[in-house]
Image (spheres, helix red, strand yellow):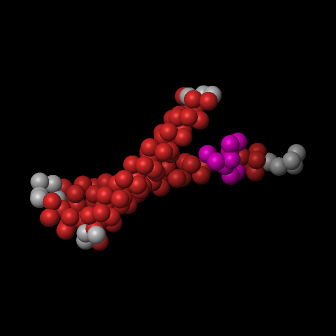
Amino acid sequence: MGFLTDRKRAMGMGSAKSGTEHFWHMKVSSVALLILIPAFIFTFGSAIGEDYEYVTAYFSRPLPSLIAALTLIVGFEHFKSGATTMIEDYVHGISQKICIIGVTCLSYAAMATGLFALAKMAF
C-alpha cells in the first residue's frame, strides 16, 4: 500500500466506496427526469378534464402509459436516493435507520401504487 500514488488511492469510489456510484446514479436519474417530466406533463395534460372512459382509453395506449410508468419509477428512485442522503447527513443513531427504512418503504409503496393504477387502466 505504501507504493501507491495519491491518485491511485483516490481513484474509484472514495473512502465510503460508494460515493461516486451514488453521484452518477443521481446525475443519470436527474437527466432522465429532465426528459421524462416534460413528456409526462405533455401526455398527462391532454387527459386532464376528460371523462373516465377517455382517460382509461388514453392510458391504455403504449406511449402515454410507458412515459407515466418511467416517470413514476425514475422519480421515486431519485426521491429515495436523495432523501436517504439527506437522512444520512442529518439524522444519527437508531432514528437514522428507522427513517431510511421508512423513506424506502414510502418510495416503493408509492411507486407500486402508481404502477398498479396504470396497469388497472391499461386492462
Query: Quadrant of the image for the C terminus?
Result: bottom left
Q: Position of residue 61 (x, y in %)?
A: 25, 71
Q: Is residue 97 above or below residue 75?
A: above
Bounds of the magenta segment:
11-19
Q: Residue at x 68, y 47 (%)?
A: 17
Residue 93 lies in the magenta stretch: no
Report which quarter residue 33 is drawn in. bottom left
Report which quarter residue 14 is drawn in. top right
Front residue (pair 24, 105): 105
Q: Is residue 112 above or below residue 87?
A: below
Residue extending furthest toward the bottom? 62
Front residue (pair 102, 83): 102
Q: Residue at x 14, y 64 (%)?
A: 54
Q: Residue at x 62, y 30 (%)?
A: 94
Q: Position of residue 19 (x, y in %)?
A: 61, 45
Q: Position of residue 105 (x, y in %)?
A: 48, 45
Tally of numbered discs:
0
Residue 16 lies in the magenta stretch: yes
Most common secondary structure along the magenta stretch:
loop
Answer left or right for 23 relative to 75.
right
Answer left or right for 63 relative to 101.
left
